[in-house]
Amino acid sequence: MLMNMESLLQTARKHHFAVGAFNVCDSLLFSTVMECAEEQHAPVIVELAPPEFSYVGSDFFAYAVKRMQNSSVPCVLHLDHGPDFETCKSCIDGGFTSVMIDASSKPFAENIEITKKVVEYAHDHGVVVEAELGTLAGIE
């Protein structure tokens, strides 16, 4: 079952368990993560980052959403390090249940402005937002 990050993490916190998060870059890795999660009856967070988008294409997003909706375990589909509002919006519209906006390469005020826009759009669609608001002097 596909759900948002907040709901999944509230349940994990309440029942004292961790949730694995796995970045996937293709359908084979995605299927493996999902099959293992279901086999172990373990909730899972599947993450996709923009550099991986060129490998999987938009058809993959529809496949992943449907597969996760039909899963026997709680699942989150998370955008990892979305660089801009447009990417975040596209992922939200495509069924992602959690997004990270990473506009940390922008001046701080612009980063806040972009993040606020993403948060407003995401929350209107029941999607949770993570944001990278600052930088650590050349360290990711």
Image (spheres, helix red, strand yellow):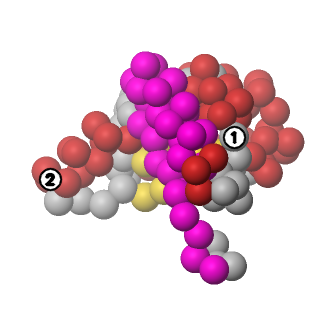
The answer, for residue 13, to whether it is visible in the render is yes
76 is within the stretch colored magenta: no
User: Does residue 34 appear to the left or right of 127 in the view shown?
Assistant: right
134 is within the stretch colored magenta: yes
Amino acid carrying label 1: it is Asp
Quarter of the view holding residue 88 = top right
- Report helix, strand or loop for mark 1: loop
Amino acid carrying label 2: it is His
116 to 80, vertically: above or below: above
Using the image as rendered, state which of residue 9 and residue 101 is in the foreground: 101
Q: Earlier in the sequence, mark 1 or mark 2?
A: 2
- Region rendered in magenta: 111-137
Location of the N terminus (image quadrant): top left
> Residue at the location (45% across, 20% down)?
125
Q: Which residue is mark 2?
A: 15
Give the x, y percent position of residue 14.
13, 50
- Residue 84: give its label: 1
